[in-house]
Amino acid sequence: MKRFLMVMGLILSSLLTSCIPHKDIVYLQNKEVATDSLQLMVEQQKPYRVQINDILNIRIKVLDQENVSIFNPIGEGNLNASASERAYFDGFTVDTHGRIRIPELGEITVLGYTTTEIEELIKNKLLEEQFKETANMFITVKLSGLRYTAMGEVRSPGTQILFQERVNIFQAIANVGEVDITGDLKDVLIIRQYPQGQQIHHLDLTDINVMNSPYYYIQPNDMIYVKPLKQKTWGTGTTGRESLATIVSVLSLVTTTILLLTRF
């Protein structure tokens, strides 16, 4: 009888620890201070520097707009195309050498530059070769959407394009349908592209101090990977109700087995 109780105790302990604790599924917990509020100094997002495969949207305006029609894409060739498709065909893609090719101006190296710096580069080149200061040029350079990929324990994995310049990790995850209950919020991976290669960064989304992280805001071409919790592989239930159902099933099986064995 003692042996039976010990076995049942072990089974119950393992099943009770298999359900996911509440603290593992709550975002932005104040883990260091006992008060209900905490003032955070969110780090100012550094200007993004253009990478290979980025798509730039460039618009040039002068007093006589016909003089710059060759530089500006029409953008209405296929009205049935989505905004992202038009951005792809009308935009200027940064090639593997870090350059874009603009009509009349030729190739311009933009790798590692901010959009503001690229605006200045194009303006100077136009003043040298095409126009005078009196043309009153107005040049805008923007990324053609912020493209990122989310995978793992999210409800709608895949690639998303957001037409915003500033997107944090919570906004990015919300756009792929949130994290499943079996996702590990304490170690979300950000795989980021740099000129020298890719690097992996770790974020704890259950900690309110994640808002101070330099990786709190995502960048174009980021990959977000949410790992599964160990409870998912155990298969004993992720909630208290599921674990209780498993316990009842195990108890019924063990009881039936003992009754059958004692009859013989």
Image (cartoon, rainbow, N blue to C red):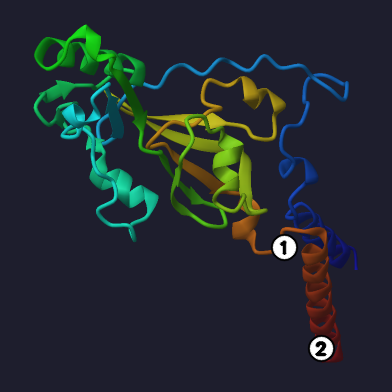
Which image quadrant for residue 66? top left
Using a 10 Å C-alpha cutoff, classify the residue at mark 2 as few (fewer than 14 neighbours), some (14 to 19) or many (20 or more).
Answer: few
Residue at 62% x, 19% y is: 212
Residue at 77% x, 66% y is: 242
Residue 260 tag number: 2
At mark 2, the secondary structure is: helix
The residue singled out by tag 1 in the image is 237
Which image quadrant for residue 186? top right
The mark lying in front, picked from 2 and 1, is 1
Kind of residue sitting beneath label 2:
Leu
Residue at 76% x, 16% y is: 39
Vertical placement of residue 102 versus 185, above or below: above
Quarter that holds the N terminus: bottom right
Q: Residue furthest right?
A: 1
At mark 1, the secondary structure is: loop
Kind of residue sitting beneath label 1:
Gly
Vertical placement of residue 238 versus 21, above or below: below
Can you give x and y, in whole percent of width and height, for residue 177 in the image?
59, 53
Mark count:
2
Task: Out of 237 and 68, give the one closest to the viewer.
Answer: 68
